[in-house]
Amino acid sequence: MFYIHCPYCQEHREEEEFHPRGEAHLMRPTDPDNATDEEWGDYLFFRQNPRGIHHELWVHSVGCRKFFNITRNTVTYEILETYRMGEQPSITAETEKLRKEQGVQTADGGWQTIGAQPDSRALNEETSS
Amino acid sequence: MQRYSGFGLVKHALGHHENWERQWRNPTPKKRYDVIIVGGGGHGLATAYYLAKEFGVKNVAVVEKGWLGGGNTARNTTIVRSNYLWDEAARLYNHSLDLWKGLSQDLNYNVMFSQRGVLNLGHTLQDMRDIQRRVHANRLNGIDSEVVTPQQIKAIEPALDISSRARYPIMGASWQKSAGVARHDAVAWGFARGADALGVDLLQNTEVTGFKIRDGKVLGVHTNRGDIEANTVGCVAAGNSGVLAKMAGIRLPLESHPLQALVSEPLKPVLNTVTMSNHVHGYISQSDKGDLVIGAGIDGYLGYGQRGSYPTIEHTLQAIVEMFPMFSRVRMNRQWGGIVDTCPDACPILSKTKVKGLYFNCGWGTGGFKATPGSGHVFAASLAKGEMHPIAAPFSIDRFHTGALIDEHGAAGVAH
Ligand SMILES: Cc1cc2nc3c(=O)[nH]c(=O)nc-3n(C[C@H](O)[C@H](O)[C@H](O)COP(=O)(O)OP(=O)(O)OC[C@H]3O[C@@H](n4cnc5c(N)ncnc54)[C@H](O)[C@@H]3O)c2cc1C
Ligand SMILES: [Zn+2]
């Protein structure tokens, strides 16, 4: 369960009040009439889908109904920051790498309670049926 | 390979079952193979098996970062059906269903394929129109499929609430009698044992960390156990396909999401068939052990952790109780998640790439278990010949730029 800080309501609220809407900062082709099939396909269907830091769009659907952005780790699920539409993330894959190396804790704006376990590599561990 | 039989069982009973042969070897990687398959799930193992068995390519390695079947293959809810809308998808899933029918005999391994039928419920007028359209399309494609009324549904699955008191009363369903379930880990093990017996090296605990590519041609893979060479590499890595693609400088139109499932405490036999509902959004069947096997939708956010969030489980169980009020006090036993590779048109990708010799088989998302033998078979044919098999050809990555999508969101409605 995520606790998400809505940058408009300025409050932490439960995940169920929100809806994820996919990758943030997508740019519609600037010259639609002359965009190639390649450009349209890329815009419509191709996403970063990173294993790690992801900037994503969420909507506070049963709260203020505003869209905003979250920077989140897709492996640990840790929410690193939330920020308003039109703003840029302050945490990126590069700064995260630095943070890890230097051991500085910069996370703010959100947290969640599910523990972060890396995929188990052990052989013959019990799997679900 | 030691063949399994009733006689063998009796013989081993006399030896207190202490002398069973290991099901497959644990070889050290060779320097070079003809074909490398990345990903030891059902699809990868089936590909290797058919390569060796039907296409004469025996110098094959399956490279798996964890243990065989530890990905989505042994995490799914095992529904097998082929009642998809479009010709391309119907051909692919029906090819698979045909292979399922003889799979236990072919592999000499009991995959417990049980054709107990699948109901896809309709709760609105539009649901029923969509169901009729899909059933007619199925029949044109030679797939057994029919529209059934609430009374017929009650006869098939008495535990379902077909009353008009339900919040979303059941108006009808599509019914595919030849559909069913199978034991998912046995599928992985059966293909693994069969492939191993034909000479395929199954390399577990071996993670692909990069590709050796020169002049636009693949020459092999880098792994945590050293480099392995091959001029043909097939990636079958489900939720991690995008991560692999990135290593090769390729982009895939996939997003990785957690998909959860759960099972209840074991009950006496209570369900006859598999029941799915797109509208109230849940599905259920009963395993041979007696537990109710339950699932529904993906967690909406991207995730590579093999777990999901609690609200999704709650929604799933709400749907089950809506359809089967009698299950409201059944206790749930275990819950887990897998990472599914969802594709924009809810159809898989079986494709060449811009790197010569490098192929991808992915994008099966929430519904690829049913396709395991068929996918493995047509992918093996494609790798062996260097040309995509006619059944696989429409599933090329190119369709996301040409626009020739195969939209199966209707047939794939509730994750399965
Ligand atoms: C909860 C749940 C329920 C489902 N229910 C159904 C259902 O009822 N019916 C149905 O038809 N489908 C269902 N599915 C979908 C189905 O499970 C999958 O589509 C199918 O099993 C995919 O098989 P696979 O072999 O392609 O992938 P997997 O079994 O996931 O195998 C991929 C393998 O690749 C390995 N790998 C990844 N990266 C690397 C690397 N770098 N190096 C080496 N190895 C790597 C992984 O460890 C993994 O073992 C469900 C899925 C889930 C999660
Ligand atoms: Zn808000």
Image (cartoon, coloured by chain):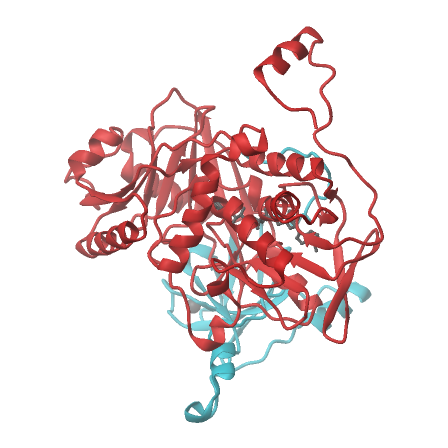
Chain colours: A cyan, B red
Q: Residue furthest top?
A: B14
Q: Is residue A74 visible?
A: no
- Residue B260 in view of the camera: yes
Give the camera-side residue of A73 and B133: B133
Q: Residue at x 51, y 42 (%)?
A: B76
Please determine whether, in this image, residue B187 is positioned above or below residue B227.
above
Q: Tell me where residue A33 appears, x and y as whole percent.
A: 41, 92
Please state if B216 lies on the left or on the right of B290 as rendered: right
Percent position of residue B324, x then y: 29, 34
Residue B182 relative to residue B127: left or right: right
Residue, x 54% and y 45% (percent of image)? B337
User: Is B210 left, or right, of B315 in this rendering?
Assistant: right
Which residue appears at 24% of the width and 28% of the height?
Answer: B158
Out of B103 and A19, give the one closest to the viewer.
B103
Given residues A90 and A24, the one toward you in this image is: A24
Examine the rendered structure and indicate whether residue B74 appears above or below residue B135: above
A125, above or below B239, in the image? above
**Rendering quadrant holding ligand 2:** bottom left
Count the marks: how many?
Answer: 0
Q: Position of residue B346 (x, y in %)?
A: 43, 59
Whether B168 is drawn above or below B254: the answer is: above
Quadrant containing the N terminus of chain B in the rendered view: top right
